[in-house]
Image (cartoon, rainbow, N blue to C red):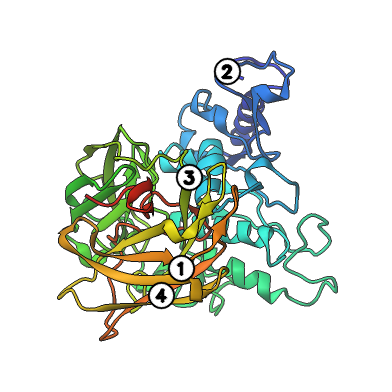
Amino acid sequence: MGGTTDQDNFKHACETAGRRILAVNPHLLVLCEGIQIYPEDGRDWASTAATDYHSTWWGGNLRGVRDHPVDLGAGNGDQLVYSPHDYGPLVAPQPWFEGEWDRTTLERDVWDPNWLYLHKENTAPLLIGEWGGFMDGGPNQKWMTALRDLLTEERIHHTFWCLNPNSGDTGGLLLDDWTSWDEEKYALLKPSLWQHGGKFVSLDHQVPLGGAGSTTGVSLDDVYGDGGGDPSDTTPPTAPTGLTATATGGSSVALRWTASADDTAVTGYDVYRDGAKVSPAPVAATAYTDAGLTPGTAYRYAVRARDAAGNVSAASAAVTVTVTTPPGGDPSGTLRVQYRNNDGSAADNAIRPGLRIANTGSGPLDLATVTARYYFTRDAGAPTVSAWCDHAAVGCARVALRVVPLTAPVAGADAYLEVAFTGGTLAAGAHTGDIQLRMSKTDWSPFDETDDHSRSAAAEYADAPRVPGYTGTALAWGAPPS
C-alpha cells in the first residue's frame, strides 16, 4: 500500500488503470473495488499470520482508503467511486454470522469499518458492486433484508447479483427455467430501487427508464414538470437546533432537539455519536434514546435533518454528555435481561416488548425472586395501561405482570411494566426463552414510544441494560432511568 508501485499494490493498480481510462475518455466514472484483507493496527504486510489482518469478502475491504486514498490526478477526484462487495452466510460462513447478530452488529463490526465510513464521512461516493443471495427464509434472507434497509435509508447506489439463475452461490432474479421471475426476491429488492410515484428514477435523473414515453420509469423533469427538476431535490434542509443530551442511567442517553425551520420538508433526523450515525433509520420525532453505552464515558452527539430527496442538513451544534456508572447492575452478576422489539411502530396503540431472563451465575436461579422492569411513558393524561402475556416459553401462567406508575416522572418514563414469575428454577447458563408481552391503554389511544427509556429497535434478542433486573429488592442488572 502507500506510495509503492508494487504489482500487488491495489491502490497503485486502481490509479494506473483509472488514469489511463480517463486519458482516453475523461467523462467516465472510475470504480475501484476493495481487497480482502488489511493489516490490523501495529501490523504490516510483512506478516504471514492470518490473525494479523482484518479479513472480509473478496472486494469488500476498503479500510486502507482512510490512510491511502486513490488519487486519479488533478481535476479527476470527483470521478472516483469506491465499489465494495458484500455477501451473506450462504456464500461462506463468517465470524460475524456466529451467535446473536443483526443489522446493528453488521453495521458496527463489518460495514462501518470496511466501507460504510466512506459514505458517512462524505469521503467519496459508494456503489455496492455486488450483493444478493438465496431466499432461504433464514440467516441469508435476514442478512439481505438488513443490507437492503441500509442501502435504502442511506440512499447508497448498488448493483444486485444477479439476473441469471446459474450463479451457484446466490441464484438470480430469474428462476431455473430462465423465463420465470423470482417474485419473492424481487419484492425484497424493490424498496432499494429509487422510485417516485410507483415509477423508477434513472441514475442521471434525466432520461426515463425504457426510453421516451416509457411507463417503467421517470426523470425528475417528469416528476416536477419544470424542465429542470425541483430545487428542493438538491437543496438541503436547515439544521435542527437546541440539542440537549441527558444521561438516563448507566448506559443510555436521552436526546431532544428543536425541529428544523423548514420542518415540513423534513422526513426524519439522523443522530450521530462521536461522528458516526447511530440511529438505524431516520427518526421521525425530535427525540431519541441512545443505548448500550459504556458507563463513565463521555459521548459527543449531533443531529442532521433529512428530506424526501435524501438531502441532509448541516449538523446541529454538538453536545457532550458523560454516562455515569450505575449503582449495581454488574453484567458479571447472576442474571441479564434480554430484549427484542416485537412491534416496529412507535406510534400505534400497543407496546409489544419481548423479554428473556438469562442466568449468568454459576448455580441455579430461583425465578420466584426475579423481576424485570420495562420503563415507558403513558403520554398525555397518564391514562390507565393494561398488560398481557401473549406467549411465554415458560408458560404465561407462570408470568405475573403489573403496571406501576412512577411517583415522579423522569426522562423517558412515567411508569414501568414489572415482570415477575410465580416460581421455577433456571439452570446456570440457561434462559427463560421467549416471553411476548403487550400493553395498551384502556381507551386504546396510541402511544408515543420514541423517547421511552426501555425501547430500542432491536429485531433480535440482545442484552438490554435499559430493562433493569432484580433479585429480591437488589438491582442485579442494568439501571432504571434517573
- Residue placed under numbered mark 4 in the picture: 438
Q: Which mark, residue 2?
A: 2
Question: Between residues 303 and 85, which one lies in front from this camera angle?
Answer: 303
The answer to whether mark 4 and mark 1 are in CB contact below 8 A is no
Query: What amino acid type should be assigned to the residue bearing mark 4?
Result: Arg
Task: From the image, state whether disc 4 or disc 1 is nearer to you.
Answer: 1
Q: How many marks?
A: 4
The answer to whether mark 3 and mark 2 are in CB contact below 8 A is no
- Residue placed under numbered mark 3 in the picture: 334
- Residue placed under numbered mark 1 in the picture: 422
Query: What amino acid type should be assigned to the residue bearing mark 1?
Result: Thr
C-alpha distance separating marks 4 and 1: 19 Å
Q: Residue 259 in the image: x percent, y percent?
A: 19, 58
At horizontal 49% and vertical 50% (from top left) the residue drawn is 104
Residue 111's image quarter? Answer: top right
Q: Residue 61 in the image: x percent, y percent?
A: 62, 35
C-alpha distance separating marks 4 and 2: 56 Å
Query: What amino acid type should be assigned to the residue bearing mark 2?
Result: Gly
